[in-house]
Amino acid sequence: MTCNYVTYASVLTALSGLAAVDHGKQVHNHVLRAELPFYVVLQNSLIDMYSKCGNLTYSRRIFDNMTERTVISWNAMLVGYSRHGKGGEGVELFKLLKEQNKVKPDTVTFLAVLSGCSHGGMEDRGLEFFDDMVSGKDGVEPEIEHYGCVVDLLGRSGELEKAFEFVKQMPFEPTAAIWGSLLGACRVHSNVDIGELVAKRLIEIEPENSGNYVILSNLYASVGRWEDVRNVRDLMNEKAVIKEPGRSWIELNQTLHTFHASERTHPRQEEVFAKVKELLVEIKQAGYIPDLSCVLHDVDEEQKEKILLGHSEKLALAFGLIDTPPGKPVQVMKNLRICVDCHNFAKFVSKVYGREVSLRDKNRFHHIVEGICSCGDYW
């Protein structure tokens, strides 16, 4: 049976969800060898696949070479810039879209641009785009997801009181996702007062969502309120809420290696732990200081540092350094949000060892080159 462009587009979509870039490249090569006409839907799938696998350069190359672009093509590229924290590039692409005036932006277009501004620390530009939507200037009315982007935009920039008031005045009933975004911002900026109010509302809406309890617990831990941390854990036990375990993985030689915190099951665990300790010694000499606020247990500082060393991101990164030749980029993926300390750890590893490091969590990419991250350390 001969594969057609629909077959290849479907396979690319599946691979983008797995972030399996090597397999994606193989499919791309098959497409080229088959000399298939480059249908827009196939090119869009390639843009999306490369973006989700961490290679925006390839995505943009395909985008620039397209003879015909639909709004989905523009949206795929804009979403890619947002996911990679490149809000400035996203804004420039959006300007190009409007200047060419061949394709009309839709609700997804504005979601991508607003999200890019949020992740890129571009509060003023994001609010300008949203105001244009509200005024009807671009012919796209804001929906609840766009209001959610504004909440995220304000929250990330530290405008928590403003974000809280914005939520209360929205013309829509706030969703759990919107409250969750605000709670996450309260954790980042250690605002317990608003955080407690938001968490109470969230737990009423989603009593079985472990993430809400975990973020509230993290918030209390960040300010040393250990009794409240224990109370949250007791509440989770009472409601039988189970926290999703964090895990990180790395693909090497078409084999997936998965690590959990303080991993003890990997066949090369001793070698991995030894490598983590070696990295710690080297990067401490370069100025790395463990961020003990990332430890959610009331223990002494020495024990906190030991707990940090066992984080799954560090284990996967260490394994990647062991099993790849010097100078080769290392890409680690995680099912939850990247830990701030692991992010700093990776930055120092990149700088000291001359490695390009890519960290992908459930929401975004962090590309680290010579110790500098694409996110600009903007959380």
Image: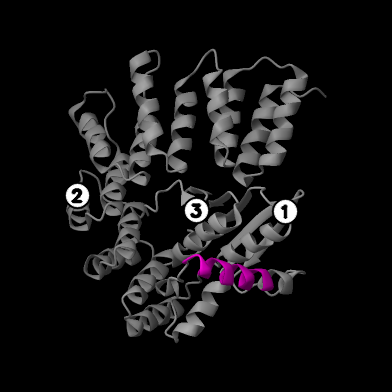
Give the SS element for disc 2: helix
Tell whether label 3 touches label 2 (CB within 8 Å). no
Give the SS element for disc 1: loop
Magenta-drawn stretch, dominant element (helix, strand or loop): helix
Q: What residue type is labelled 3?
A: Gly
Give the SS element for disc 3: loop
x, y percent for residue 195: 27, 66
Image mark for residue 80: none
Q: Is residue 77 above or below residue 211?
A: above
* Residue 194 colored in magenta in the image: no
From the viewer's perspective, is the residue at label 2 or at label 3 nearer?
3
Q: Mark 1 points at which residue?
A: 324
* Residue 275 colored in magenta in the image: yes
Any part of residue 335 in sight: no
Q: Determine the CA span between mark 1 and mark 3.
A: 19 Å
Bounds of the magenta segment: 274-287
Q: What residue type is labelled 1?
A: Thr
x, y percent for residue 50: 59, 35
- The one nearer the camera, 205 or 80, is 80
